[in-house]
Image (cartoon, rainbow, N blue to C red):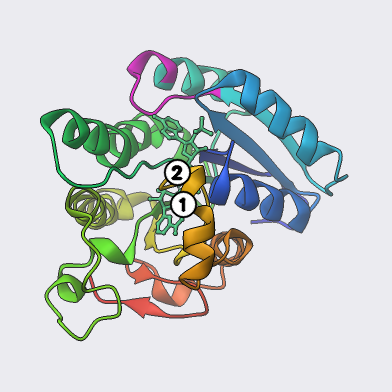
């Protein structure tokens, strides 16, 4: 990408946690970065947009209504981005949900709708806009909890963590990354699964934040830095892989 060219980055779930911090990291990193914040709740999105703009970032921001479980918002968002910007250089499929056990048909469906079907259908809808980029990239925000290799290793740090629906959904998301690698290599689109690490967010409820801190969770700014590194080409040597922060690569 030419130094002076704008890089259009669409990130889902930009209204909270890792998505919000990543939006801030990306828009602060370069005057050429334009971050399109995909949010399901426009009131919350407007407030976050205002907050991030008040920090005077170098780059620019815009907001689009995007609920990854809703096909109408997906097609309307893609149409708006097409007419406003004409392409997408980076798609970050970040929006995600986590429900505890026991599983129910309802929470299984909700988990897969957001964590798997959303990223697949949104990326498919964005394909024509990604094809217009000189350096297209897709980052699927996964979790090490989705690694079958780790799940079957009794010595693993998180072996005792019971999160079956979530783990299944992130394993499926990892397969989506592999399938996207296969389908999109013809136009040079790079795809990664990225684990943002165990960080303090509202993923398991605002009331669980202190528990996360007590258990050693780091700041979600560390996840944002990991996403920025991928966008900036620092993990190009590990394309098609399941990467973590701090230069690490995870087994699938
Ligand atoms: N936190 C961790 O330790 C951790 C570890 C591994 C992986 N991850 C992954 O990181 C990603 C971000 O999670 P987080 O930790 O930042 O959690 P979070 O604080 O709960 O943020 C989740 C974001 O996703 C949005 N979202 C949820 N459902 C959506 C939908 N249907 N359409 C559009 N947006 C939706 C939320 O919107 P609202 O603001 O409207 O609620 C929120 O902005 C997830 O994919 C998660 O699985 C997190």
Residue 159, horizontal then vertical, whole percent: 21, 74
Left or right of 77: which side holds 55?
Answer: right
Q: Is the C-beta separation of discs 1 and 2 under 8 Å?
A: yes
Quarter occupied by the N terminus:
bottom right
Query: Up-down: is 48 above or below 19?
Result: above
Which residues are drawn in magenta? Answer: 65-73
Provide the secondary structure element on which disc 1 rests. Answer: helix
Q: Say whether mark 2 is within 8 Å of ligand 1.
A: no
> In this view of the protein, which residue sits in the foreground, 105 or 46?
105
Query: Up-down: is 129 above or below 206?
Result: above
Label drawn at residue 205: 2
| Residue 16 location, quadrant | top right
Circle 1 Cα neighbour tier, 10 Å, few/some/many (<14 / 14–19 / ≥20): some
Residue 226, horizontal then vertical, whole percent: 55, 66
Left or right of 228: which side holds 117?
Answer: left
- Reading the image, the residue beneath label 1 is 208
- Residue drawn 45% across and 46% down? 94
Query: Up-down: is 3 above or below 252?
Result: above
Provide the secondary structure element on which disc 2 rests. Answer: loop
Residue 121, horizontal then vertical, whole percent: 30, 31
Confirm whether residue 202 shows in the render. yes
Confirm whether residue 91 shows in the render. no
Label drawn at residue 29: none
> In this view of the protein, which residue sits in the foreground, 124 or 243?
243
- Residue drawn 25% across and 48% down? 183
Asked if the stretch drawn in magenta spans residue 241, the answer is no
- Residue drawn 16% across and 74% down? 149
Asked if the stretch drawn in magenta spans residue 67, the answer is yes
- Residue drawn 54% across and 31% down? 38
The quadrant of the picture showing ligand 1 is: top left
Circle 2 Cα neighbour tier, 10 Å, few/some/many (<14 / 14–19 / ≥20): few
């Amino acid at each position: 990408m030419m130094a002076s060219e704008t890089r259009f980055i669409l990130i889902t779930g930009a209204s909270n946690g890792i998505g919000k911090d990543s939006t801030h990291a990306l828009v602060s990193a370069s005057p050429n970065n334009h971050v399109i914040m995909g949010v399901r709740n426009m009131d919350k999105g407007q407030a976050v947009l205002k907050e991030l703009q008040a920090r005077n970032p170098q780059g620019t921001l815009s907001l689009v209504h995007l609920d990854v479980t809703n096909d109408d918002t997906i097609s309307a968002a893609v149409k708006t981005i097409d007419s406003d910007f004409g392409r997408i250089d980076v798609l970050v499929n970040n929006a995600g949900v986590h429900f505890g056990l026991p599983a129910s048909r309802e929470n299984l469906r909700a988990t897969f709708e957001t964590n798997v079907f959303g990223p697949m259908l949104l990326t498919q809808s964005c394909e024509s806009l990604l094809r217009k980029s000189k350096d297209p990239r897709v980052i699927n925000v996964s979790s090490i909890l989705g690694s079958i290799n780790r799940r079957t290793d009794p010595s693993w740090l998180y072996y005792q963590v019971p999160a079956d629906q979530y783990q299944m959904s992130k394993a499926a998301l990892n397969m989506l990354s592999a399938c996207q690698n296969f389908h999109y290599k013809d136009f040079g689109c790079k795809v990664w699964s990225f684990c943002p690490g165990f960080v303090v967010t509202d993923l398991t409820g605002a009331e669980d934040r202190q528990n996360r801190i007590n258990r050693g969770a780091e700041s979600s700014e560390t996840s944002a830095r990991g996403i920025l590194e991928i966008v900036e080409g620092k993990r190009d040597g590990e394309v098609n892989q399941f990467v973590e922060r701090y230069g690490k690569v995870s087994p699938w």
